[in-house]
Image (cartoon, helix red, strand yellow):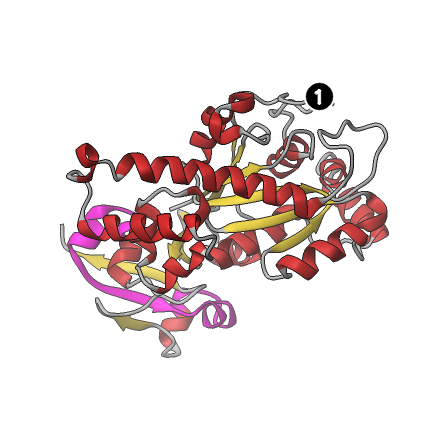
Amino acid sequence: MSFKCGIVGLPNVGKSTLFNALTNSSKAQAANFPFCTIEPNIGIVPVPDERLDKLAIISKSKKKINTTIEFVDIAGLVEGASKGEGLGNKFLSHIREVDAVIHMIRCFDSDDIQNVKTSVDPIRDLEIIETEMMLADLDSIQKRLEKNNKKNIDEDQLKILKIALDCINQSKDISTIYDQFDKKLINQSSLLSLKPKIFVCNVDEASIKNGNRYTKNFIKKFGERNTLIISADIENQINQLENDEKRNYMEMIGIKETGLDKLIQKGYNILELDTYFTSGPEETRAWTIEKNCTAPKAAREIHTDFEKGFIRAETIAYEDFIAHEGWVNSKANGKMRLEGKDYIVKDGDILNFRFNT
């Protein structure tokens, strides 16, 4: 599986610039006027993983295949989007299709870049977007709970929708639904307010290392757990450079990781994802799975037949595979295990599945 992140925010906060940087492309039009992006731009990006590179070298693989992440650059939302302002209904429908929402928030002053508001206030801007998403959910829930539509909804979804409706009407924390229902059931509701969120504070170059007054106020209110400080413009510049130049430039401005690396780490954390590998002479490949995934379900990522006919998983921990330089020596030194249907795959496991067809 790969996961899909939608980049949202008010117009002119740097969404398309960030998208171009993340996807290393100029696919997204970036210009200094509102609603520059109408249809969502989509970019599929290989997930960088040093472990994959090392495994491919040890196995002398002909091919190396990264797992992927999909970024969707969604047009800027405005107040009234839930009622159709600024093509809002169309844009909100694009958000329903993503696994996680990246809130792009303006945290810089500039006379050159147009702002839809008269002042810079990241907390206000986020609240505008979240309010519009909540109002869109309210409208969606009310329609789904109408008598004619109710009969098509199962009991669990009805409970989720009713609790969500109460939370919105009573201004309660809607995320408490996660304490009551399985994540997969909640995802089926397609409620915008329940999408996992990453907050990206878009800053100027001077604020990359330590942030600024805008980011400090934002983090004071919303915390650091899901918040990143990134300069979309600088990220875009970095991605125009060759590897050596890129490293030198990052070192000069004090950046240890790219924005892509940071976003992937946050994305994997909030979506509770892990990576396992397959590795041999033909190819070394990374596979994304949910945390606490059983071996048969991990096998399904390769092919449904692998899950149906699952017998055993030959398993080597990443550290052991590296230390013993591959399958043969790992097995000879007792580091390969045969795991059954109940085995919970660990992040970094190298697996080879035995199955019947």
SS of the residue under disc 1:
loop
Residue 304, magenta (yes or no): yes
Relative depth, front residue between 102 and 254? 102
Residue 178 in the figure: left or right of residue 35: left
Relative depth, front residue between 119 and 304? 119
Which residue is at a point 62% across and 58% down the rendered structure image?
222
Which residue is at a point 13% across and 50% down the rendered structure image?
357
In the rendered view, would you say 235 is above or below 172? above
Dot 1 amino acid type: Phe
Relative depth, front residue between 183 and 308? 183
**Residue at the bottom extreme of this rendering:** 334
Residue stretch in magenta: 300-328
The answer to whether residue 301 shows anywhere in this view is no
Q: Quadrant of residue 218?
A: bottom right
Residue receiving disc 1: 33
Coordinates of residue 294 in the picture (x, y in percent): 28, 63
Residue 235, magenta (yes or no): no
Residue 46 in the figure: left or right of residue 159: right
